[in-house]
Image (spheres, rainbow, N blue to C red):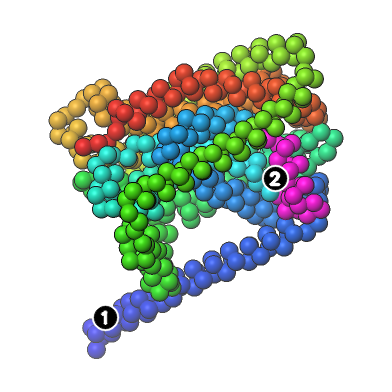
């Protein structure tokens, strides 16, 4: 009896755990869904209230949970909009030869325009669409965050589509995949790794510009939304170090939770989309993903709802399926040609009318700017150009080797990923006063400090893209390099640099645009009622926005856009073409 009792006890405990653990998982999933539903209702109620353009920001830590929730909602709503835009825009640009050059040039221009240049038009447009409602101001702030998140995701998806191996595209053609089938079964999975890592850096960029997007002046009016960005900016303006520390700790907590609950499971799930013939022995793991896969509730929903809907969808969109009537080849080609011609005509007409109207109003506004202001802005643009390239050079020296190391070692990625997320999301503007004070004690001015702030804001574009490129290198190629005993130099020149090249170019392009964008906060900074600035185009844009000088703001924005587009045309486009034609994973 004494020998059987422990065995029976342990067996009964195992049975109890086996029965209760799935129930606990289902309870946690249900609680999470209920909390998400409550947040949606709370956001809808608060956004439909009467407009309050300038709310009072309290520096008490007790208000931080509510501020954190509001900022998190804005950032992730902007991220969802950015993801949809990136997929649609990148898909059209990659497969439409007539519009590709125009769309990529437009993307170059848009990513070079700073957040503050969008600010007056976006806020006035949103408030006119939703007068006397808080949703207008909220959507204005969300769209401003959107302009800081979307461009690198669009570039990443476009670059991934252009580098899909030809044999995979031919397989889709042979199997008569429809466009929807090809998108879901090939294009999205192939671009998943790069898109996910760029999503992470986009959200980090949203946190970086949060202080600008939640508290800003437009002419004589001041807008202030409740959130972490307003809290940190208010604390920094009043020199409240304790409040700054509380705000930064809260932001770090949100970033860590987001990494563990969202990004880590998605990265572990996306590992199955690597283009390789031999499965890697080391994988990134996620306890949250394991729990999700073992939830009885989610399995039931998947079995009863998701699977039937997806099967019906695939049946519906499959080419040659029973629900789709095929036209004769000549009629289908003729109809497709007519539809394409009509679509292009409508797009061109709308673009000409829109651009013509905007150009007319811009010329009227630019007539107020003097020649002296133009020359001053050109000189300021030259100084910002030097700072941007210095920050890119410094960033590349450390992000490339570190990114490759993280991408090649999943165990290191498990440790380094949350650290990189925190560092990338950290609002450097909150630490900038300390940086400036330290540099001034060393005998250096704000010119060097602005390079440091640009570096803090843009180096992550390169790092995260290099990590994605290193993770996307097939394991069999790495094993072949090991079997042939490649030296370090040969391994870098033959495998690593060619493998990460398309991702590296994407990172450099977006980092360059991000550095120009970051100049608006790097070269012009307010602290304790004083304004610190240095010679640069970003300082000119910030000062023009601060004083409501719209002619100077428009002229400075045009100069910045022209400089970024020129650099992209002369340098980055050629490197992009090299990555598309030479460094592909074609058989």
Query: Relative to 451, is 239 above or below?
Result: below
Is 71 rendered above or below residue 435? below
Question: Picture coordinates of residue 28 (x, y %)?
Answer: 49, 69
Residue 121 counted in the magenta span: yes
Q: Position of residue 533 (x, y in %)?
A: 72, 21
Q: Is residue 395 magenta?
A: no
* Total labels drawn: 2
What segment is highlighted magenta in the picture?
Answer: 116-138
- In three-dimensional space, the C-alpha distance between marks 2 and 1, rounded to whole angstroms, equals 65 Å
Q: Is residue 335 visible?
A: yes
Q: Nearer the viewer, mark 2 or mark 1?
A: 2
Write down the residue under mark 1: 7
Provide the major secondary structure of the magenta segment.
helix
N-terminal of the pair, mark 2 or mark 1, is 1
Residue placed at 74% from the left, 59% from the top? 48
Describe residue 440's horizontal placement relative to residue 507 as left or right: right
Which one is in front, 496 or 552? 552
The quarter of the picture where residue 453 lies is: top right
| Residue receiving disc 2 | 140
The local secondary structure at tag 1 comes to helix
On residue 174, which mark appears?
A: none
Which residue shows up at 46% across the image and 37% down it? 93
């Amino acid at each position: 009896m004494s020998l059987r009792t422990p065995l029976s006890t342990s067996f009964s405990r195992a049975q109890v755990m086996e029965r209760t653990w799935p129930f606990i998982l289902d309870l946690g999933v249900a609680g999470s869904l209920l909390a998400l539903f409550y947040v949606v209702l709370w956001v809808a109620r608060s956004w439909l209230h009467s407009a309050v353009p300038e709310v009072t920001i309290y520096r008490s830590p007790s208000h931080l949970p509510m501020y954190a929730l509001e900022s998190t909602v804005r950032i992730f709503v902007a991220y969802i909009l950015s993801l949809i835009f990136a997929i649609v825009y990148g898909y059209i640009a990659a497969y439409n030869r007539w519009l590709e050059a125009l769309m990529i040039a437009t993307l170059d221009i848009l990513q070079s325009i700073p957040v503050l240049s969008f600010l007056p038009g976006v806020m006035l447009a949103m408030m006119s669409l939703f007068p006397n409602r808080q949703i207008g101001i909220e959507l204005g702030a969300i769209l401003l965050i959107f302009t800081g998140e979307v461009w690198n995701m669009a570039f990443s998806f476009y670059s991934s589509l252009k580098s899909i191996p030809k044999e995979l595209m031919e397989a889709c053609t042979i199997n008569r995949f429809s466009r929807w089938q090809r998108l879901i079964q090939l294009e999205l999975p192939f671009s998943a790794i790069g898109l996910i890592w760029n999503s992470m850096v986009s959200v980090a960029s949203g946190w970086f510009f949060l202080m600008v997007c939640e508290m800003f002046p437009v002419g004589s009016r001041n807008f202030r939304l409740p959130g972490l960005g307003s809290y940190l900016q208010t604390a920094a303006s009043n020199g409240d170090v304790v409040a700054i520390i509380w705000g930064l700790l809260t932001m770090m907590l949100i970033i860590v939770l987001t990494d563990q609950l969202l990004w880590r499971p998605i990265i572990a799930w996306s590992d199955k989309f690597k283009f390789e013939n031999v499965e890697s022995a080391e994988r990134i793991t996620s306890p949250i993903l394991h729990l999700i896969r073992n939830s009885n509730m989610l399995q039931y929903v998947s079995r009863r709802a998701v699977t039937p809907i997806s099967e019906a969808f695939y049946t519906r969109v499959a080419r040659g399926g029973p629900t789709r009537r095929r036209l004769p080849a000549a009629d289908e080609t003729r109809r497709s040609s007519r539809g394409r011609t009509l679509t292009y005509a409508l797009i061109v007409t709308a673009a000409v009318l829109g651009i013509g109207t905007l150009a007319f109003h811009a010329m009227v506004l630019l007539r107020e700017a003097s020649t002296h202001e133009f020359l001053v802005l050109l000189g300021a643009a030259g100084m910002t150009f030097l700072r941007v390239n210095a920050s890119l050079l410094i960033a590349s020296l450390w992000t490339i080797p570190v990114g490759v190391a993280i991408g090649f070692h999943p165990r290191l990625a498990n440790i380094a990923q949350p650290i990189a997320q925190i560092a990338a999301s950290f609002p450097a503007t909150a630490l900038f006063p300390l940086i400036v004070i330290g540099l001034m004690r060393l005998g250096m001015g704000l010119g060097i400090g602005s390079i440091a702030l640009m570096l803090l804001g843009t180096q992550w574009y390169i790092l995260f893209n290099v990590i994605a490129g290193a993770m996307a290198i097939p394991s069999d190629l790495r094993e072949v390099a090991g079997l042939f005993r490649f030296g370090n130099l040969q391994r870098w020149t033959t495998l690593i640099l060619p493998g990460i090249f398309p991702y590296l170019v994407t990172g450099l392009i977006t980092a360059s645009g991000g550095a120009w964008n970051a100049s608006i906060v790097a070269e012009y900074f307010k602290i304790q009622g004083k304004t610190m600035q240095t010679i640069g185009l970003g300082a000119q844009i910030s000062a023009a926005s601060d004083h409501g000088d719209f002619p100077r703001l428009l002229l400075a924005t045009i100069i910045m856009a022209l400089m970024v587009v020129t650099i992209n045309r002369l340098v980055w486009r050629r490197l992009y073409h090299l990555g598309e034609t030479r460094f592909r994973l074609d058989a």
